[in-house]
């Protein structure tokens, strides 16, 4: 079941929240996505690539696929299509994906490399690879999985059927060896106000659909009806009595939970999601649900303090739980177990699960072939065991040095910009500089890889492997609750195509897999790398100063270090940017939520702004060459646009708009460049162009500390964003000349 605020935070760290997260509030998760095609910039379009290809892609002669441009589109009307329109016309989304773009190109590459590693481990196991090979083999043993059918979950379903009290159901929700289907998630992370120690954190949840809007808004009525049919079918499949009626009742139950759930934008507010309580205080605050039983079942009977996230939702959901019939609660939990377990059960379960969660919710026509699913699950359970081999094979040591140089260049630029701010007082500037100086940088891979000795893996027990990996991960967190915080730990494995900022550690992290074209190419023109990986680096640094990231100081402590006057000025600028994105209509009657995406939008704007300036500094006063008629500044902007080249299906786009803190790909291009003065000069943008914004005028430099990627699955969509019709009325707005960024909990880029 989803924990809305917790899933958002996990997504912001670059992962996708799972029901079995050891931390429903902030822990990143390791599930990969993949693609079937790779861009071939040299041939001006898409070329199918062998599913066993492990070669990195390359773009043009100096790093940009110019053949993907559409000269029939004016840069000032739609820069996203100007840079990628021909590619958009030619590209098709693979049938087993909800979206396809350059992130997915690298996801495919990483998937293929991991596939090769796992096949070797399965066929020729060594002491170092035996567990990853056995886990992968257990998924690939389809005959064994079919033979077992639903037997793996029968013991859990029997316990639910046998429960005679709500207390008994709560105990089952907290089990350490199950899929934790429940109303309230419990996790362990570094304390935001004391990052030297770990804290127990809680968030509410209970929803099966991506967001509360799916239950409450008329636009999702058809999807909600399909969910009820899916739930009824799943209950029938497990032999649950009166399946149709129970499905109707469980959907009504989840609808009540949705009404009590926070809006996702509210979940971003770190001041509102830090609410320490004793277990006794929590019990008094939210009567109707026995939290003591839940904590004891999770191994936390002696905990003296918990941090409650979406606190005002707790008493409402506890009351709904107490007011709901035992039969409905049991059916809801049984469905939750079946739904969460289905990918690891026989074909009928897996197909039904995909039919709703993949095809209906994301528009994906076909399920991934079995080996791709096996790679994703194995990679998620044993991420760093796989990552250690990945790094040895695919990550050149020189890339780490080059990345450090880029990071230091961008940090230097940001430091100079802070000093030039005319709206920020000296006290806030000094604190900002102190935070910048303390940024920790992690590149490529962790210094020490995780030890999986305590995890038992069997080649003939897929479901057991999944459950044991969940239990292993929980105990890894539980066992260190009273230990010093491990700041060397990574929130993503090296083979993950992503990056993140973690405000509690004040660190930026770049896994090895993202340090490849089109993000980073040692052979490309420097301007392209500044627009690609330079923009990513600056994006993550900006997160340290976005609307939520700015709330942590250099030590990672959630503490207000801004003067009240400077904070008010920053917030006014942030609201201006939020209103711009609110005006962008992506699908008919579907707009971007400017406050949900504010942190990422600030980080995007700060990222490209700082990367461009760092490129200028790197020239040391020399004029950059013109390559194929493209100037240096134009190459930086093309490099940024190429990173976000993507097609997406309508259903996936709709899900992203309602449940993801990242803006759609085209908005991450058009919404950013129109706020950067240098773009106007580089492409001769004039009043009357659809993306044109009026300059704010002298003395209005908004280099304000900015913010920083769930991503959500996406796929092909007709016309994508059309002609950005919502931009025309925005032409009356004023342009953000420059923007400094700020970060929040932990944010990712895709």
Image (cartoon, rainbow, N blue to C red):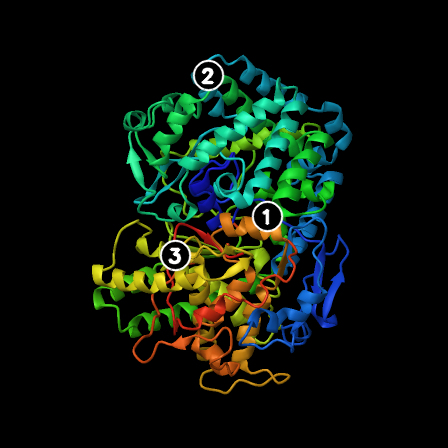
Residue 497: image x %, image y %? 58, 54
Q: Earlier in the sequence, mark 3 or mark 2?
A: 2
Camera-side mark, 1 or 2: 2
- Badge 1 density bin: few <14, some 14–19, many ≥20, Cα 10 Å: some
Give 193 or 656, whichever is nearer the viewer. Answer: 656
Q: CA distance from mark 1 to mark 2?
A: 42 Å
Does 626 appear above or below 11? Answer: below
Q: Say which label, 1 or 3, has the lower sequence index.
A: 1
Residue 168: mark:
2
Residue 26 position, x and y percent, is 43, 43
Q: On screen, 746 above or below 138?
A: below
Per the model, the C-alpha gap separating discs 1 and 3 is 29 Å
Instruction: Give percent across and percent down for residue 503.
Output: 38, 52
Q: Residue at x 22, y 68 (%)?
A: 426
Q: Quadrant of the C terminus?
A: bottom right
Residue 10 shows in this picture: yes
Q: Could you tell me which secondary element the residue under label 3 belongs to?
A: loop
Q: Which residue is mark 1?
A: 388
* Residue drawn where x is 34% and y is 59% of the image: 438
Q: Quadrant of residue 165?
A: top left
Residue positioned 42% across, 66% down in the render: 606
CB under 8 Å between discs 1 and 3: no
Could you give the CA–CA distance between mark 3 and mark 2, rounded to whole angstroms? 42 Å
Marker disc for residue 743: 3
């Amino acid at each position: 079941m989803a924990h809305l605020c917790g899933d958002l935070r996990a997504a912001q760290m670059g992962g996708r929240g799972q029901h079995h997260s050891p931390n429903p509030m902030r822990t990143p998760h390791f599930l990969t996505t993949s693609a079937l095609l790779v861009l071939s910039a040299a041939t001006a379009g898409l070329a199918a690539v062998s599913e066993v290809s492990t070669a990195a892609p390359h773009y043009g002669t100096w790093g940009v696929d110019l053949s993907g441009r559409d000269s029939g589109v004016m840069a000032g009307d739609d820069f996203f299509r100007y840079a990628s329109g021909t590619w958009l016309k030619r590209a098709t989304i693979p049938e087993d994906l909800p979206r396809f773009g350059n992130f997915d190109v690298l996801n495919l590459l990483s998937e293929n490399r991991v596939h090769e590693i796992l096949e070797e481990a399965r066929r020729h196991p060594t002491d170092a690879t035996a567990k990853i090979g056995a886990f992968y083999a257990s998924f690939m043993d389809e005959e064994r999985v079919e033979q077992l059918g639903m037997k793996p979950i029968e013991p859990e379903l029997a316990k639910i059927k046998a429960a005679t009290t709500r207390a008994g159901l709560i105990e089952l929700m907290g089990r350490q060896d199950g899929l934790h289907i429940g109303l309230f998630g419990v996790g362990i992370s570094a304390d935001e106000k004391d990052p030297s120690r770990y804290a127990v954190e809680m968030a509410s949840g209970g929803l099966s659909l991506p967001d509360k809007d799916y239950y409450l808004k008329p636009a999702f009525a058809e999807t909600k009806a399909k969910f009820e049919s899916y739930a009824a079918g799943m209950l029938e499949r497990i032999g649950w009595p009166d399946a149709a009626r129970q499905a109707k009742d469980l959907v009504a139950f989840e609808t009540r939970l949705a009404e009590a759930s926070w809006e996702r934008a509210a979940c971003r507010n770190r001041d509102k999601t830090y609410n320490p309580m004793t277990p006794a205080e929590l019990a008094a605050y939210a009567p109707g649900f026995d939290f003591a039983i839940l904590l004891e079942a999770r191994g936390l009977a002696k905990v003296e303090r918990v941090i409650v996230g979406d606190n005002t939702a707790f008493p409402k959901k506890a009351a709904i739980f107490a007011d709901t019939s035992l039969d409905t609660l049991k059916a809801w939990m049984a469905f939750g177990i079946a739904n969460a377990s289905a990918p690891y059960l026989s074909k009928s379960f897996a197909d039904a699960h995909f039919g709703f969660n993949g095809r209906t919710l994301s528009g994906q026509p076909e399920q991934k072939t079995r080996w791709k699913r096996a790679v994703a699950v194995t990679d998620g359970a044993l991420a760093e065991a796989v990552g250690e081999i990945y790094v040895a094979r695919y990550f050149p040591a020189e890339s780490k040095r080059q990345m450090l140089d880029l990071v230091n260049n961008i940090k230097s630029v940001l430091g100079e910009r802070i000093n030039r701010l005319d709206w920020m007082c000296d006290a806030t500037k000094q604190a900002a500089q102190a935070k910048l100086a303390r940024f920790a940088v992690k590149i490529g891979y962790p210094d020490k890889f995780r030890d999986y000795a305590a995890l038992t893996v069997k080649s003939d027990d897929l479901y057991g492997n999944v459950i044991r990996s969940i239990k292993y991960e929980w105990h890894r967190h539980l066992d260190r609750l009273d230990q010093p915080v491990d700041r060397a730990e990574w929130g993503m494995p090296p083979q993950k195509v992503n990056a993140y900022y973690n405000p509690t550690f004040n660190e930026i992290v770049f896994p090895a897999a993202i340090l490849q074209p089109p993000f980073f190419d040692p052979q490309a023109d420097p301007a392209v790398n500044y627009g690609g990986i330079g923009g990513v680096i600056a994006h993550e640094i900006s997160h340290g100063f976005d609307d939520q990231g700015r709330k942590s100081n250099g030590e990672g402590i959630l503490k207000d270090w801004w003067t009240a006057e400077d904070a008010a000025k920053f917030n006014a600028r942030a609201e201006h940017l939020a209103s711009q994105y609110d005006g962008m209509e992506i699908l008919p009657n579907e707009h971007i939520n400017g406050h949900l995406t504010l942190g990422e939008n600030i980080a995007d704007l700060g990222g490209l702004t700082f990367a461009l300036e760092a490129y200028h500094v790197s020239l040391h006063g020399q004029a950059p060459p013109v390559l194929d008629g493209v100037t240096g500044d134009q190459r930086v902007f093309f490099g940024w646009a190429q990173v976000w080249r993507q097609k997406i299906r309508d259903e996936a786009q709709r899900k992203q708009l309602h449940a993801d803190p990242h803006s759609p790909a085209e908005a991450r291009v058009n919404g950013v460049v129109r706020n950067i003065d240098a773009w106007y000069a580089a492409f001769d943008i004039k009043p009357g162009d659809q993306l044109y914004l009026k300059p704010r005028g002298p003395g209005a430099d908004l280099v304000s500390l900015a913010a920083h990627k769930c991503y959500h699955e996406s796929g092909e969509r007709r016309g994508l964003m059309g002609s950005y019709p919502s931009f025309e009325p925005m032409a009356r707005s004023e342009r953000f000349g420059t923007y400094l960024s700020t970060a929040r909990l932990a944010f990712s880029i895709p």
